[in-house]
Amino acid sequence: MNSTVFSILLVVIGLVVGFCISLGISFLNGKNASKKSEKLINQAKKDIEKLKRDAAIEQKEEAHKAKMDLDKEIRERREEIKESENRLLQRESNIDKREEMFQKRELALDERDSKLSEKQEEIQLEKSKVEEIKKEQLDLLERISGFSKDKARELVMSKVKEKMTKEISEYIRERENEAKLEADKFARELIVTSMQKYAADIASDQTVTVVDLPNDEMKGRIIGREGRNIRTIEAITGVDLIIDDTPEAVVLSSFDPLRREIARITLESLIKDGRIHPTRIEELYDKVCKDMKKQIIQYGQDVTFELGLTKFAPELIEIIGKLHFRTSYGQNALQHSKEVAELSGLLAGELGENVTLAKRAGLLHDIGKAIDHEVEGSHVDIGVDIAKKYHENETVINSIASHHGDTQATSVISTIVAIADALSASRPGARNDSLENYIKRLSQLEEVGNEIKGVEKTFAVQAGRELRVIVKPEDVDDLETHTIAREVKEKIENNLKYPGTIKITVIRETRAQEEAK
């Protein structure tokens, strides 16, 4: 117990002694720290005083420097202002000099104007004097020459006109020769190229069709009792049946190919059927007519398909198909129209025109021939009406109207169609012209030349492809021969219708004859 208390007392005493010692140490340390802090404060004050002195010195230096810079800038500004004043003074001086110069120039111009006015008055006086002298001279010349001014002018103008007429004729002749060389060369190449690309067989329809019979006994059955069968066939078909001594054959004669074809099919059907009597003939004829209408439409569709043309009205397709059974001077109208369409397309392609439109115009150019036996009027007028009815292009309508020269062509395609029509009709073997029409055409050609003044005689040669005009040498000179050739050409083009081209040759020949006795 005591030991414990003693131990506690020792601990307490140790703690008190330790605390006292620590207080002493702390006191001593605080006294030293206060001395150090005082010393530091004094040192800081000295440093602050030094910094203040340095800052004041630096501020004075900067103020001095700023003052120096400001003085320098003020001096520079004063120099600039002085230079500007000098320039302004110089400019003002220059302006004064220029104004003085302008005043002098204005005075000089006024003086010149006054001099010009005086000169103009002098010129007017001189001009009036010259006019008076000129008038006196003209009056004197008129009295001396015996010609008035108007008569002299007329005489000179007539001489000039005569001279210029010859020069103009010669110039026109030279230009025409040059143009003909180029045009003929180009046209020949163009036409030859187109014809080479298209070649069609020559086929001429005739006016009769031969129907083969299985035996000669069939002739009697076709004739019938007292000829009733043959009369019925001829009555309903409109075709003449020729039954002669030709073995196993009957001839159908008609100028209408459609009627002749219907009669041929009807007769062949009767021969196959074997029952030949009036009632059966009428039945078969009605059936063949219906089938033929379908065939006509098929012909029209085939041609438009081959040409690559579309958008035709069904009625127009049927009219096109009817051309297969129409002929013109022995040439099949549908084949002719197809050929014209092909040639028109080729020519249009060579010239850069619309090929499809050219083909369409070429195909429809003779469409009026399909029904010209049913409707009054020329095939051209009928064709124009058909084209308008089915709302064809204006170019197509003009091509139909102008392909024979009845109407002025308004487009290149119309001219192409006319050329293609002439090519198709004029190539060898394409058409069969009658002797009467041939002689009539030659006579008309010769009459055109004989009507012109100065022509002695005209001859149509080369089957009407060339016209030779012989002129009177004493009435016509060499230059006038070209004028006559041009006049003949214009008359033929305006008054005649002809296939192909006609070459016109004007001949002037002088012969001197003497007889030695």
Image (tube, grey):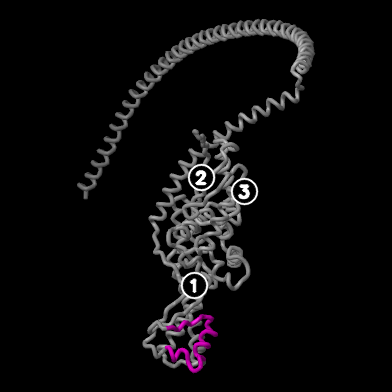
Q: CA distance from mark 1 to mark 3?
A: 42 Å
Q: Nearer the viewer, mark 1 or mark 2?
A: 2
Residue at point 24%, 46% (across, down): 5
Is residue 470 depicted above or below 166 in this figure? below
At numbered mark 2, what does the secondary structure look like: helix, strand or loop? strand
Q: Where does label 3 land, which residue? A: 451
Q: Is 5 situated left or right of 207 in this image?
A: left
Q: CA distance from mark 1 to mark 2?
A: 41 Å
Measured as percent of width and height from the top left, residue 413 is found at 52, 54
Name the kind of residue labelled 3 in the image.
Answer: Glu
Q: Where does label 1 land, which residue? A: 325
User: Is 227 inside the magenta-drawn segment?
Assistant: yes
Measured as percent of width and height from the top left, residue 288 is found at 48, 83
Dot placed on the residue nearer the N-terminal end, 1 or 2 = 1
* Nearer to us in this view, 127 or 262: 262
Q: Is 65 situated left or right of 143 in this image?
A: left
Q: Residue furthest bottom?
A: 225
Q: Where does label 2 land, which residue? A: 505
Name the kind of residue labelled 2 in the image.
Answer: Thr
* Nearer to us in this view, 420 or 274: 274
Name the kind of residue labelled 1 in the image.
Answer: Phe
Please say if the residues under marks 3 and 2 sit with CB atoms less than 8 Å apart. Answer: no
Q: Residue furthest front?
A: 517
The segment highlighted magenta reads 219-244
* Nearer to us in this view, 404 or 295: 404
User: Quadrant of residue 108 in the image?
Assistant: top right
